[in-house]
Amino acid sequence: MMRIANNKLWLLFLLLFPTLLWGNSTPMFHIRQNAKGCFVEIPKRLINRDFLLAARVMTVSSPNNKVKLYAGQRLYDPVWIRLKYDKEQLYLLRPDSKSLCEDTTHISYAAYARNAITPIAEVWKIEQETDSSIVVNWSKFLSEPIEGVDPFGGKTSPGRSLPQLNKILQADAYENNLEVSVQYGFEGTSQPFLTTVRKSLLLLPEQPMQPRIHDARVGYDNIPKRKFNSETPSITAENYITRFRIAPSHKNIRSYLQGKQVKPQQPIVFYIDDAFPPLWQKAIRKGILDWNKAFEEIGFKDVMQAKTYAEAGPEFDPNDIRFNCFRYVVSDFPNAMGKHWVDPRSGEILQADVLFHSNVITLLRKWYFLQTAAYHPAARTKTLPDDITEQLLRYAAAHEIGHCLGLEHNFKASYAYHTEDLRRPEFTERYGTTPSIMDYARFNYIAQPGDGVRYVLPPLLGVYDRYAIRIGYTYLPHEDTRTIAGWIEQKQNDPMYHYERMTLSTIPANPAVQTSDLGNAPVASATYGIRNLQLILKQLPEWNKARQTNDPFEDMPATYTDLQQAYFDHLEHVIPFIGFSDEVSEKAVEFLWKQLLDGYNFLQTDAVRKYAGNQTEAIIKAQKTIIDKMFGRIIAERISSNETSTGFTYTHYLEVSAKYLFADKTPDIFTRHLQENYLNTLKTLLTEARTSSFSVLFSPTVCEHLTCIREQLTATPSTWNNYLGSTKKLSSSLLHDSA
């Protein structure tokens, strides 16, 4: 390692006495900073080698910045760069990480190359050259924000830059990486902003890891490639999964292939922040090591290792790109995230981090209470016992480590279980709430009082998780997509092994792929969940009185808000199943209307009003969200596209809804708002349909439906007046305009 020094004879000294300065480990670059700038000596052996350029936040004056970044976070993926020089200048090249042509000897390669030259991003004057190295002034390159690399700068700037505050604080050169700490200052939009950023330049392996082709049936984060095939000729899409390079040492390959467990050539070590409380450190360590079970099944032992910062060696630095860290973020925002940086040439994960927010325990406790307190007494206490807290943190830690290993969320996993099985103690003890810890199936809200269910968490490592590690990490001497595809094919008839990426939409394309849901019977699951919420709400005052606290009711307003949100979440889990199948659609519509018209009543009891105030406005707002989703464009298109003359039709859907909504009785304030929202949503649907190719499927039905409602209501004056109430002008206008 070398630190910045002030020595006028620096270059000569570095050239003549490298061993004296660095011992047997020669740094990648030699650096000196003086009044003229920051000069870097680059060995010529590194010219045309591949590097990663990355940056992360080290410190901030406040996380309330434009991009909401905390210490330890990164905003951008690293950039792949390459250095090239001529007699006068050094160039920084930015190779295209997405386009590739494997056969550079083919006659067509020249045509490909003409359309794929490598652009130059930066250029520097060569200050000095020797037979083995060149020297350039990297002052500006290292001390100023680089857009698309630095977290702050360009579009992400928290305000007007103050260049007088920008400076290099420290530079450390190691054998394969350069670490530079930089200070940036900004005027800020409301207050001054100061940050330190770590810039890392990592030398990539000369021989990239053999890529593994992504199969959409297994959930791995992946990097897209556009491959030119000279023989076809064509350009095809091909994705590489992201994974660590886990392989047996050369001497152990034979033993591995014989089915014996061996240690990997390079284990995956995570360093745990010393700032974590001892109980948290214990839970996090277990969450990291839990993944060893999956690696053991594919022939590797001791792959995952966990050490605290204090247990690390003298060169350890949590901001150094060489180290995987589990970081403690002090924040009132409850969150946790696992991220990784990869070699864009191959998908190899080179570094990974988990950011664990201090307030994540609040979120875990909230879910634990709302989802299990009805039948699980341990969840009712204000402060959870240490053993339960440890379980919750261990689960959250293991989930984030899964992301660090390259795994994506598997929101389809929970749909593999029959809803009724989640009420069986023997089933939940063995399988938990879902086949995958990468799901958002936190705790068992299906189980009922008297069922005897004790284990309420997802499994420490599910059936799917172990399978996914097999697919991504099994060592193959030669990559064989057919072998891997065969492993996947073997499991396609078993829903325990299914995966499907969730679509970015208010209504998922596949209703089986949702967050925070449980079981394969949506109406039954929601009914059980709501039943538990009703019991919790009824018992909440008594439970709070039993708590040993000065003010047992201090958390009541927030608890009521959370419980109300949980109730409407159950309704939202059912909506995507409308149009999924005839039987499920009928059940879903009946369930939703009963809940919208009567089911919410438990949320406005005297106890609720006493401790949380009047909830009318909040309930009306939540109901509007449900109506918007039930009668928006996505559901209309889904039903209309899939309907048959003998099945669940869009006309039937609207007719049934109107029968529930416009019954011949005086509506209360909630029903009146539901009616207004219903008409408004259908009117909006007709407006949006003008830009939709599917509009011909449902627009005539909507227009006819609105006409029927108008005729129905105006035929009987008493019904019309009961319906309209104080909203006659608006309602009349809606019906007239829409029809």
Image (cartoon, rainbow, N blue to C red):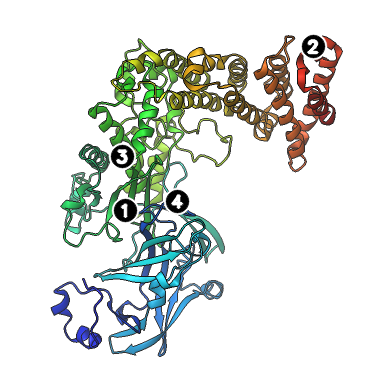
The answer to whether mark 2 and mark 1 are in CB contact below 8 A is: no
Check disc 3: other Cα within 10 Å, few if <14, some if 14-19, many if 20+: many
Q: Name the residue under label 1.
A: 244
Q: How many labels does the image show?
A: 4
- Looking at the rendered structure, which numbered label has been put on residue 398? 3
Give the mark, 1 or 3, whose residue is nearer the N terminus: 1
Q: Helix, strand or loop at disc 3?
A: helix
Relative placement, left or right, of 325 versus 75 is left
Query: Is the N terminus in the top left, top right, bottom left or bottom right quadrant?
Result: bottom left
Q: Is residue 391 visible?
A: yes
* Spot occupied by residue 46 in the image (x, y as percentages of width and height): 32, 77
Closer to the camera, 282 or 44?
Answer: 282
- Position of residue 439 measured from the top left corner of the image (x, y, whole percent): 41, 35
Image point 45% across, 74% down: which residue? Answer: 93
Which marked residue is nearer to the observer: mark 2 or mark 4? 4
- Alpha-carbon span between mark 2 and mark 1: 68 Å
Disc on the earlier residue, 1 or 4 = 4
**Label located before the other in sequence (2 or 4):** 4
Give the residue furthest to the front: 550
Mark 1: which amino acid?
Phe
Is residue 527 visible in this depiction of the protein? no
Secondary element at image label 1: loop
Q: In this view, does 697 lie above or below 380?
A: below
Return the residue at label 4. Answer: 64
Earlier sequence position, callout 4 versus callout 3: 4
Mark 2 = which residue? Answer: 719
Q: What residue type is labelled 4?
A: Asn
* Marks 1/3: CA–CA distance: 17 Å
